[in-house]
Structure formats: structure tokens, C-alpha cells
Image (cartoon, rainbow, N blue to C red):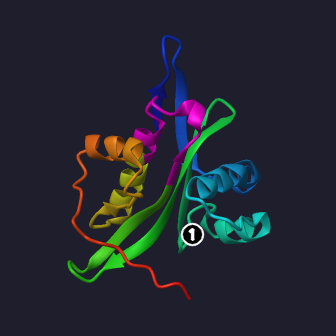
């Protein structure tokens, strides 16, 4: 998948599944995403073990990277998910993160479009995601994609 972002000298943006060789480059960005959401105990080894299960096309999900030349500009982590309401498979875009230096240049939109393409290829009913109520920058992007903001309230029970 290819897209363009940037100013007068726009560079080609490539969206592709993260490879085993690229995982080490992705891990600091995953930690930055976790810091953004105020995770207190970021464990690099736990991240490596957990996210390696999404490298390449796996049964659990997929990591997509957005690359500008050799630089990682952002990523999305997709989980294969289900809904009993339809009933059908859905795809949960659990993580979407764009490097601060690349924000506002179409990287997030390109990752959403690539995630939707993956969901369509899988025959999923829909792509879904959530964000923090105060993440207004992300919400502006999400509202501009044509996605419908739901009225569901989420709960978490820590175990």
C-alpha cells in the first residue's frame, strides 16, 4: 500500500506488515504509545514477547508499519475479533500511533485505510477502534474518515 504525505517535497509513504527484522525498530514507538496513555510499568522484554505474536500474518492479529524511506512514521496493531450481534468476525484496531514529527501529514489516515483494507480482505464485518475521551486530535482524524462514533461505554475489570 502506498500513499503520500508531507509538504512541497512529499515522500512516498509505504504501509506494510512489520517483519521480524523491523520489530526492534518498532518497540520504542510502542513504548511511546504506552507513555502517551500513561502506562507506568513499560517492560521492553514483555513488549517484545507480546508484539512478536503479531509479526507477519498470524492467527492473533497483525502489525502494520508506516514507512517513509527507512524511517518508521507510525504503526497500527490489529486484533482479529468477533461480534455476536451480526454474528461475524471484526477487526479491532487496538493501537494506532503516529510519530509526533509525522502527525498532520496523512500517516494516521493511511494506517486506518490500510487497516480497513486488511479487514475487507479477511471478510470482516467492520473495523473498530476506541480512543481516550480527551484525545481530541485523534478524534478529529477519526471523525473525518467517515467512521461512525458509537454510543457504547466501555468497562475494564482489572485481573
In this orientation, which residue lies closer to the viewer: 95 or 136?
136
Position of 156 relative to 96 (above/below) = below
Q: Residue farthest to the top?
A: 8
Q: Is residue 63 left or right of residue 123?
A: right
Q: Is residue 49 left or right of residue 57?
A: right
- Horizontal and vertical percent position of residue 35: 63, 55
- Horizontal and vertical percent position of residue 112: 40, 48
Q: Is residue 78 left or right of residue 87?
A: right
Q: Residue at x 46, y 28 (%)?
A: 105
Q: How many marks?
A: 1
Is residue 134 within the magenta segment? no
Position of 135 relative to 6 (above/below) = below
In this orientation, which residue lies closer to the viewer: 156 or 22?
156
Q: Residue at x 51, y 18 (%)?
A: 10
Q: Residue farthest to the bottom?
A: 159
Secondary structure of the residue carrying tag 1 is loop
Residue 72 sits in quarter: top right
Q: Residue at x 64, y 62 (%)?
A: 55
Q: Which residues are magenta?
A: 96-111
Mark 1 Cα within 10 Å, few/some/many (few <14, many 20+)? few
Q: Residue at x 32, y 67 (%)?
A: 124
- Horizontal and vertical percent position of residue 7: 48, 16
Residue position for label 1: 58
Amino acid at each position: 500500500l502506498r500513499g503520500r504525505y508531507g509538504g512541497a517535497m512529499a515522500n512516498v509513504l509505504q504501509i506494510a506488515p512489520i517483519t521480524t527484522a523491523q520489530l526492534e525498530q518498532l518497540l520504542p514507538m510502542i513504548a511511546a504509545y504506552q507513555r502517551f496513555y500513561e502506562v507506568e510499568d513499560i517492560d521492553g522484554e514483555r513488549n517484545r514477547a507480546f508484539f512478536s505474536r503479531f509479526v507477519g500474518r498470524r492467527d492473533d492479529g497483525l502489525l502494520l508499519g508506516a514507512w517513509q524511506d527507512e524511517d518508521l512514521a507510525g504503526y497500527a496493531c490489529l486484533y482479529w475479533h468477533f461480534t455476536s450481534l451480526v454474528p461475524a468476525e471484526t477487526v479491532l484496531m487496538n493501537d494506532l500511533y503516529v510519530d509526533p514529527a509525522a502527525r498532520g501529514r496523512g500517516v494516521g489516515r493511511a494506517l486506518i485505510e490500510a487497516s480497513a483494507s486488511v479487514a475487507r480482505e479477511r471478510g470482516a464485518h467492520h473495523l473498530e477502534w476506541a480512543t481516550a475521551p480527551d484525545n481530541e486530535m485523534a478524534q478529529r482524524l477519526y471523525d473525518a474518515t467517515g467512521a461512525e462514533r458509537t454510543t457504547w461505554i466501555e468497562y475494564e475489570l482489572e485481573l
